[in-house]
C-alpha cells in the first residue's frame, strides 16, 4: 500500500504540473479520475492481498475476476460522465485513459513483483 500512495502522489504531482504548464490539456475532472483510480486500486490491492493468503489453487481465476471487475467499474464510471454530457468530453476521456494506463501499469508491476516473490526456484 505505501507503493500505491507514493505512485498516486507522483501522479498527482505530474497532473498538477501538467495543469500548471499546459492548462488546456488537463480536464477539470482529472482530479476526480485520479481519486476514483486511487480508490479502485486500493480495493484491488486489498482483494489481491486476501487472495494471496489462500492456497495457490485457482488464483488465476481470482486475478482475472479482479481485472474484469476493475474494467467494468471503470466503464461504469466513464458511462456516468458520458451520459451526464460532461463539457470537454474528449479531454476528459483522454485524461481518463492516460491515468488508467498509468494505474494499470503500476498494478502489473506490483503483481509481477508479488509473483516473483512468491515463485519457487528449482
Image: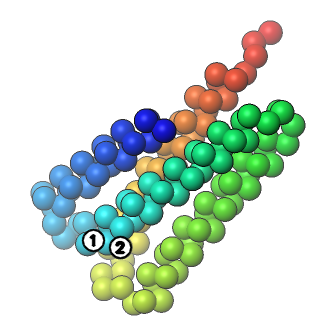
Q: Residue furthest left?
A: 21
Q: Which residue is mark 1?
A: 27
**For the point 36% across and 77% down, which residue is it?**
90
Q: Position of residue 112 (x, y in %)?
A: 61, 32
Q: Horizontally, is 42 left or right of 50 in the view?
A: left
Q: Nearer the viewer, residue 14 or 8?
A: 8
Q: Position of residue 73 (x, y in %)?
A: 59, 68
Q: Nearer the viewer, residue 40 or 21?
A: 40
- Helix, strand or loop at label 2? It is helix
Q: Residue furthest top?
A: 122
Alpha-carbon neighbours of circle 1 within 10 Å: few (<14), some, or many (≥20)?
Answer: many
**For the point 66% across and 62% down, which residue is it?**
69
Q: Horizontally, is 26 left or right of 94 in the view?
A: left
Mark found first going from the N terminus, 2 or 1: 1
Q: Which mark is residue 109?
A: none
Tags 2 and 1 in contact by the CB under 8 Å rule? yes
Amino acid at each position: 500500500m505505501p507503493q500505491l500512495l507514493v505512485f498516486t502522489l507522483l501522479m498527482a504531482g505530474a497532473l498538477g504540473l501538467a495543469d500548471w504548464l499546459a492548462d488546456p490539456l488537463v480536464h477539470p475532472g482529472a482530479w476526480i479520475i485520479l481519486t476514483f483510480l486511487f480508490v479502485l486500486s486500493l480495493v484491488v490491492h486489498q482483494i489481491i492481498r486476501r487472495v494471496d493468503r489462500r492456497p495457490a489453487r485457482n488464483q488465476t481465476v481470482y486475478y482475472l475476476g479482479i481485472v474484469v471487475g476493475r474494467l467494468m467499474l471503470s466503464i461504469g464510471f466513464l458511462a456516468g460522465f458520458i451520459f451526464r454530457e460532461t463539457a470537454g468530453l474528449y479531454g476528459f476521456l483522454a485524461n481518463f485513459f492516460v491515468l488508467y494506463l498509468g494505474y494499470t501499469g503500476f498494478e502489473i508491476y506490483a503483481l509481477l513483483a508479488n509473483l516473483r516473490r512468491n515463485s519457487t526456484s528449482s
